[in-house]
Amino acid sequence: MNYEKPWMKLSVHFDADQITNQLDYSFTSCDGSADPRHGPYMGGVRFKQGQHVYLDVNCCGSKESDFSGFQIIDCCIVSVPQLTQIGPDLPTRYSMPSPFLQSVGATYQLPLDFESHLLPDDPELPGLRRIRQEWKHNLDVGQSKGRWELAFFMTVRITRGEQDLPELRVFSFDPEASVGGKVEM
């Protein structure tokens, strides 16, 4: 991770044996402002203009179920622009299609360029194999203020032992996101 510029890291987590399709996710940033716990941005993700956003994907699976690994085969961020201006005698305005410079539209297909790491056994989580894949790139937050519904979708191929066929699973999450100061409406 390049720590020279303001940064934020998105960490997503899933269990190879879970029955839901929801990713556990967390945003951390260099100044602690990513995931507000109070104020007008509570419950959302607050990006800063010019920030670099990094991604890592964490998976665990039971050694008993013969979990051996996973491969990301599809990974996409979707942003749905929200209203930024509405009212009598005002033109209706929306945020840009995406807060990220790499995306010209509402969807951005992340290049599948990840570095995989088998994590050491954790004495507090006996019997689990843990793997982290770190994206070798980053997203750049643009200069435009705005608000978006943000969604993240990922398809993975889960492997177990040599005799079992790989399992394809889709996982996702969908918080609200904003960039910059207050958006007046």
Image: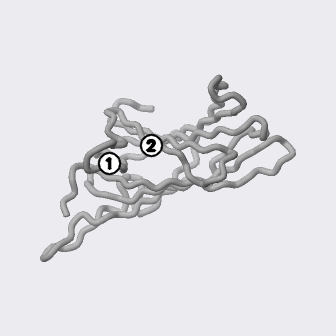
Mark 2: few/some/many CA within 10 Å (<14, 14-19, 20+): some
Tell me how many marks there are: 2
In-image side of 8 versus 143 (left or right): right
Q: Position of residue 173 (x, y in %)?
A: 50, 53
Q: Amino acid at mark 2?
A: Asn
Q: Is residue 49 above or below residue 88?
A: above
In-image side of 76 versus 86 (left or right): right
Front position in the image: 60 or 110: 60
**Residue labelled with disc 1:** 42
Q: Amino acid at mark 1?
A: Met
Q: Position of residue 55 (x, y in %)?
A: 49, 41
Mark 1 vs mark 2: in front: 1
Q: Position of residue 18 (x, y in %)?
A: 66, 48
Q: Which mark is residue 138?
A: 2
Front position in the image: 119 or 111: 119
> Residues at badges 1 and 2 in contact (C-beta under 8 Å)?
no
Question: What residue is drawn where x is 17% and y is 72%?
Answer: 87
Q: Which mark is residue 60?
A: none
Alpha carbon separation for disc pair 1 and 2 = 25 Å
Mark 1: few/some/many CA within 10 Å (<14, 14-19, 20+): few
Q: Position of residue 47 (x, y in %)?
A: 33, 46
Question: What residue is drawn where x is 29% and y is 49%?
Answer: 41
Secondary structure of the residue carrying numbered label 1:
loop
Pick out the residue farthest to the right. 163
Q: Image quadrant for the C terminus?
A: bottom left
Pick out the residue farthest to the top. 123
Q: Image quadrant for the N terminus?
A: top left
- Of pointers 1 and 2, the one earlier in the residue sequence: 1
In-image side of 161 versus 114 (left or right): right
Secondary structure of the residue carrying numbered label 2:
loop
Question: What residue is drawn where x is 65% and y is 38%?
Answer: 60
Question: What residue is drawn where x is 74% and y is 38%?
Answer: 68
